[in-house]
Amino acid sequence: MNEFQNLGLDEPILQAVNDLGFTKPSEVQAKCIPVLLESETDLVALAQTGTGKTAAFGFPLIQKISEESRTTQAVILSPTRELCLQITNEMKAYSKYVKGLNIVAVYGGASITEQSRQLKKGAQIVVATPGRIKDMISRRLVDITRVDYCILDEADEMLNMGFYEDIKDILSGTPKEKSTWLFSATMPKTVAQIAKKFMHQPVEITVGQRNIGATTVMHEYYTVSGRDRYPALKRLADANPDIFSVVFCRTKRDTQRVAEKLIEDGYNAGALHGDLSQNQRDLVMGAFRKNQIQMLVATDVAARGIDVDDITHVINYQLPDEIETYTHRSGRTGRAGKSGVSMVILTRSELRRVSAIEKKIGQKFVAKKLPDGMEICEIQLYHLASKIKSTEIDEAISPYLPAIYDVLQGLDRETIIQKMVAVEFSRFHAYYSKSKDLNTTGEAPNGDKNSARFFINIGERDGYDWKSLKDFLKEALDLDRDAIFRVDVKDSFSFFNTDDSLKEKVTEVFSNYKSGGRTINAEIASSPDSSGRRKKRSKGGKTKSDPHKKRGASSRSKKGKGHRGKRRSGYF
């Protein structure tokens, strides 16, 4: 049974819901839709980004709009062009069976003539960015004097971007008797001021707690010296070969600089900031959505409205000035029921800010140490082996195989495997075997000093993320959840830590463990150094060459979501 049927929605909307594959409303949808359908009321809804807020206001709005009238009956304000277009497309999908309903997007960076032409046809719902609609109102291309509904989506983001005066001017031009629905992830003072000035006894709905971060996100921090921020960023990327991330910088200059350095070092990276033209911005976001960019380096303002559900990591290259901004950053991952990781690279002087953020988001940070060179080599070795195993054989290579067999004649299976792995892996080993420790604190965080690190042969491909793997291990080992830490999930394998005293128990449990007919092995993780010891690091930590700069395109994923993706000339 489709649970949306219990919310009071009309049949045309339910048909669209079925087409979209929605069967169970999210919490914000279950709480908002009945209230908005049953009465004409103002409403303030606080819920994290990615919880289904568009449908929460979209379904009741479509049902209440009169498609017979061609006047503009509702205005939806959103902070960015991307979010404006996304809302418009979703609203059109929701109303596909409602004949005569016209929804028009109004935003900057596009032809005002074309947008005004669409409005003249009659648009019952206008989705707009504040700056563009204010301009069109002044030109008398949009009439909002008779709207029945005004929706502010991502209100805190709009106000953080400096749209306070614009929003006040727009709302002042709408009828007093309208219904205003305000949706926001957080409730800073500016949002409260808008609610107080323009809303009358609004119903307040809160999903989770106010200003609380999403529980699907793990928060981590790494302490380094200021000059080691960029090497730390590279190390985090190399320790997570399948990373698909947004890297946040404070300024446009830092954003461009970091992106250029990543591109130069062979990573799939792109920059997103206010100095880009709309066309450049569209190209970057298009490449990011197609996974052609693995590391999108962005300013907070430019990243507003990014709506991509599969982001695995948010990396705070620098902490933002406002705690609410950190909440928005971390909300880019851990969406649509998935989990994610928010990483912070900071210096010792910034450590005090972590506790302030913890209080605000209601979650604890995990203090972690950056992996050393040999740990990264280990991860890369397992990743390479997994990639070789999972690669599908292209029939196009068949004509070349006889000649290849001749070249490899006389080599046994083990030698071929060793040589094949060495071709790619030796570069990483040569680079990282001489790398220095970037961590500024000598203490091992979270009990790492007396802990054991395990490798386990299951990962994302088996349906696990850090949260579900931790639950699986807790049940399999019959341990408290806190006894398992530093859970790092890769594509087809993972790592986790336990107290050193639990080594024998873990080894024993997973000596012959089966789940769903599959044998699951866990063993002590070891460095790929054949001596079994960490190699001595050089004092300077410098190396002759970066392995990313040498690798050819043949070692990279076609999608750009594999180890490093296809080498590109870069995105701005």
Image: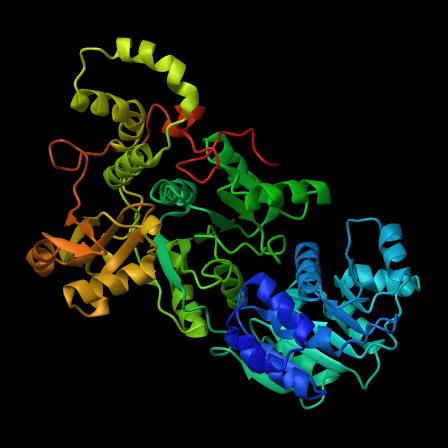
> Hey, which quadrant is residue 424 in on the image?
top left
Q: Position of residue 438 (x, y in %)?
A: 31, 44
Q: Give the left or right position of residue 443, taking residue 489 as reference.
A: left
Q: Is residue 474 left or right of residue 289?
A: left
Q: Is residue 443 visible in the rendered structure shown here?
A: no
Relative to residue 278, is residue 160 drawn left or right? left
Q: Nearer the viewer, residue 204 or 402?
A: 402
Q: Which of the 4 image quarters holds residue 363?
A: bottom left
Image spot of residue 233 (x, y percent): 41, 44
State how the image is colored.
rainbow
Q: Residue at x 45, y 61 (%)?
A: 334
Residue 76 coordinates in the image, percent (x, y): 73, 69
Answer yes or no: is residue 386 visible: yes
Residue furthest right as drawn: 140
Give the total number of marks visible in the rendering.
0
Q: Residue at x 33, y 9 (%)?
A: 403
Q: From what the image shows, is residue 437 above or below residue 36?
A: above
Spot the residue most to the bottom.
Answer: 201
